[in-house]
């Protein structure tokens, strides 16, 4: 048929927002839209630090895709993409092939280990529902193991590599969970160590220094040790080697030190910088007019400073909206709209009742910032699933 085929890869923030907008804006039979995702659920990545630490149920960090999209308007395919072939306008799935006229790549990032030896083999990552289930169970298991081998205090040492958003938010939750676990397993809390290692000269690089200071104080009070300006040199089965060869023994290393783009993109022959595509003003891959790249796989440069915006859910969502608009415009032969990022600020949680953030041009910390974080989370649930989803998955307290 002559109906254009739109294929969206990944039901993350970018892919879901594109799908929701397309199903609203496209007229009947104007395009065939297919959404492909590895799982039949969308995960709310920005919540994953909670189930990872065990302070919330993983169920609250995922939503069935069938509850989000209208399957009369969008075909959902649960499958894993194994290859993208722009030259043939095809996508190879583990169990089939799809052809497209327009492709949207929203497959999310992958951990960037900067080639640190042993990191891929020995460290955990906070990336998906499955990866956080593993972390949660692993942490509890270390407490159980310690009870059988009380000389192994390395079971009670938790090393988090990276003091970016993900690392800091996870540490806040973990510090809240530790007293609970100590009680449950009859463990003396003074034996437990949470060590955060960051190579940059500050935690939360790019964040307001006064708020960073506040965040570190809050976390230190909860028992966190910071090793800022210290590089992880190697990760082994026994822990990490840092700085000039010092070993920190730990059975739990969680790496949050970096995100890169999805390998499938560079394998497709699309030009990338650390796996990310420097997209044109309409979010298209250079040299590929019909391929849009969103979220953690894209690089969008700040028009003033010339630096790329950090990859966030916020920018991925805005890109999804812009991408859907441009797909509809393309199909209707109307002019495309350039993508302009509108930064609404950022709030990082530091565990229960504590957060820091910048929003509406103002700084927030403590309880007010924690409220702001909740409001942002609820707003997201509302955008993707309306009031019913807010009531089912929202955390109000
Ligand atoms: P993702 O949301 O990563 O989704 C990608 C999708 O593609 C997934 O559903 C995945 O299953 C699927 N997929 C991957 N590979 C394949 C394949 N081969 N085949 C099929 N499907 C595949 N950002 C903020 O703005 N605010 C925050 O407070 C914030 N907090 C965060 C806290 C944590 C703990 C983490 C980890 C991240 C946080 N972020 C936050 C960053 C934000 O989550 C990401 O920038 C965002 O998820 C990127 O969205 P995306 O659309 O690129 O892809």
Image (cartoon, rainbow, N blue to C red):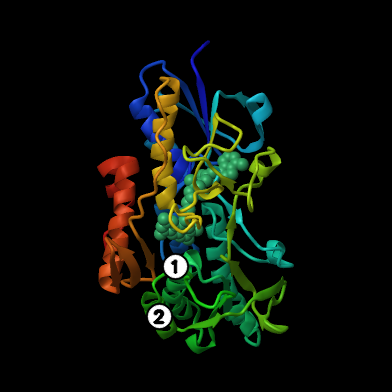
Helix, strand or loop for disc 2: helix
Q: Is residue 77 above or below residue 209?
A: above
Residue 324 location, quadrant: top left
Query: Which numbered disc, 2 or 1, marks the residue that appears first in the sequence?
Result: 1
What residue is shown with label 1? Answer: 169
Q: Are marks 2 and 1 in contact (CB under 8 Å)?
A: no
The answer to whether residue 28 is left or right of residue 10 is: left
Q: Is residue 122 above or below residue 198?
A: above
Quadrant placement of the C terminus? bottom left
Whether residue 248 sits left or right of residue 62 in the image: it is right
Q: Give the crowd class for mark 2: few <14, some 14-19, many >=20 residues within 10 Å.
A: few
Mark 1 neighbour density, 10 Å: few (under 14) some (14–19) many (20 or more): many
Residue 202 visible, this angle: yes
- Which residue is the site of mark 2? 213
Q: Which residue occupies 66% across, 62% down?
A: 113
- Residue 47 in view: no
**Picture coordinates of residue 6, whole percent (x, y):** 50, 26
Residue shown at the point (46%, 77%) measured from the top left: 178
Q: Say which residue appears at 48% left-offset and 86% top-offset.
A: 189
In the image, residue 370 lies at what x, y percent? 30, 67
Is residue 1 depicted above or below 89 in this figure? above
Q: Marks 2 and 1, how far apart in space?
A: 15 Å
**Where residue 12 appears, x then y in whole percent?**
48, 44
Label 1 CB-ligand 1 distance < 8 A = yes
Identify the secondary structure beneath mark 1.
Answer: helix
């Amino acid at each position: 048929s002559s109906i254009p085929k739109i294929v969206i890869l990944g039901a993350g923030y970018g892919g879901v927002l594109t799908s929701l907008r397309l199903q609203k804006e496209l007229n009947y039979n104007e395009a065939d839209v297919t959404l492909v995702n590895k799982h039949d659920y969308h995960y709310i990545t920005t919540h994953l630090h909670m189930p990872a630490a065990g302070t919330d149920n993983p169920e609250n960090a995922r939503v069935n895709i069938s509850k989000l999209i209208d399957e009369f308007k969008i075909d959902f395919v649960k499958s894993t993409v194994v290859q993208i072939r722009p030259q043939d306008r095809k996508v190879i799935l583990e169990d089939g092939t799809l052809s497209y006229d327009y492709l949207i790549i929203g497959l999310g990032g992958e951990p960037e280990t900067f080639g640190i030896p042993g990191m891929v083999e020995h460290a955990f990552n906070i990336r998906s529902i499955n990866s956080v289930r593993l972390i949660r169970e692993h942490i509890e298991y270390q407490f159980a193991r310690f009870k059988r081998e009380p000389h192994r205090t390395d079971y009670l040492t938790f090393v988090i590599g990276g003091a970016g958003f993900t690392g800091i938010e996870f540490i806040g939750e973990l510090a809240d969970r530790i007293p609970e676990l100590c009680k449950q397993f009859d463990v003396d809390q003074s034996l437990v160590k949470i060590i955060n290692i960051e190579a940059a000269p500050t935690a939360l690089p790019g964040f307001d220094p006064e708020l960073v200071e506040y965040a570190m104080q809050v976390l230190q009070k909860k028992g966190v040790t910071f090793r800022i300006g210290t590089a992880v040199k190697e990760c082994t089965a026994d822990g990490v080697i840092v700085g000039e060869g010092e070993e920190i023994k730990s059975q739990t290393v969680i790496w949050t030190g970096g995100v890169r783009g999805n390998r499938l993109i560079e394998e497709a022959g699309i030009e990338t910088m650390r796996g990310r595509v420097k997209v044109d003003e309409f979010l298209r891959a250079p040299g590929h007019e019909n391929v849009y790249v969103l979220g953690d796989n894209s690089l969008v440069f700040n028009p003033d400073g010339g630096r790329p915006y950090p990859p966030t859910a916020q920018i991925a969502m805005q890109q999804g909206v812009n991408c859907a608009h441009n797909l509809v415009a393309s199909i209707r032969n109307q002019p495309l709209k350039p993508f302009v990022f509108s930064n609404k600020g950022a709030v990082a949680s530091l565990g229960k009742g504590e957060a820091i953030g910048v929003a509406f041009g103002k700084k927030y910390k403590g309880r007010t910032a924690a409220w702001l974080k909740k409001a942002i989370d609820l707003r997201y649930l509302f955008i993707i699933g309306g009031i019913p989803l807010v009531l089912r998955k929202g955390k109000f307290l």
